[in-house]
Image (cartoon, rainbow, N blue to C red):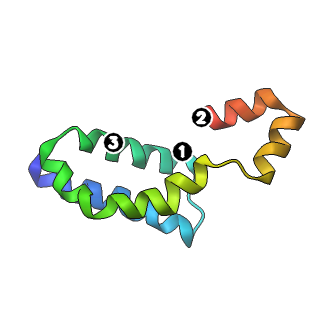
């Protein structure tokens, strides 16, 4: 596990960081965060994650959990589809 941990975590972090420059599908980003969250439960991975946690939170997590104008419009026009998209 230790052999691959750093590489996998760095790949997931680089995908998340590239969302500022490139379009990366939401499912890929979601999977990257699943990788990181599973790494938090393992002591070998937490050391690789520590330097990146603040950046991930500030650049991706917090901006995407806040409602914006488009989210409100989408919810008002089709609430069921809005919930489906946010759950995928």
Please state which of residues 12 and 62 is positioned toward the viewer in this rendering.
62
Determine whether the residue tagged by mark 2 lies in a helix, strand or loop: loop
| Labels 3 & 2 near each other (Cβ < 8 A) | no
- Mark 3 sits on what residue? 37
Q: Position of residue 4 (x, y in %)?
A: 17, 53
Residue at the (82%, 42%) spot, across then down: 74
CA–CA distance in space, label 3 to label 2: 17 Å
Q: Earlier in the sequence, mark 1 or mark 2?
A: 1
Q: Position of residue 73 (x, y in %)?
A: 85, 45
- Label 3 crowd bin: few (<14), some (14–19), many (20+), radius 10 Å: some
Q: For the C terminus, which image quadrant?
A: top right
- Mark 2 sits on what residue? 88
Residue at the (64%, 49%) spot, across then down: 66
Q: Position of residue 41 (x, y in %)?
A: 22, 38
Q: For the N terminus, which image quadrant?
A: top left
- Mark 1 sits on what residue? 27
- Label 1 crowd bin: few (<14), some (14–19), many (20+), radius 10 Å: few
Determine whether the residue tagged by mark 3 lies in a helix, strand or loop: helix
Residue 11, quarter of the rendered image: bottom left
| Labels 1 & 2 near each other (Cβ < 8 A) | yes
- Label 2 crowd bin: few (<14), some (14–19), many (20+), radius 10 Å: few
Q: Report the disc number at residue 71.
A: none
Determine whether the residue tagged by mark 1 lies in a helix, strand or loop: helix
Q: Nearer the viewer, mark 3 or mark 2?
A: 3
């Amino acid at each position: 596990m230790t052999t691959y941990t750093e590489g996998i975590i760095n790949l997931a972090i680089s995908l998340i960081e590239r969302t500022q420059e490139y379009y990366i599908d939401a499912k890929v980003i979601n999977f990257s965060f699943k990788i990181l969250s599973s790494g938090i439960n393992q002591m070998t991975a937490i050391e690789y994650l520590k330097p990146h946690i603040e950046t991930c939170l500030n650049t991706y997590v917090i901006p995407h959990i806040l409602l914006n104008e488009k989210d409100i419009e989408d919810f008002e026009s089709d609430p069921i589809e809005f919930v489906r998209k946010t759950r995928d």
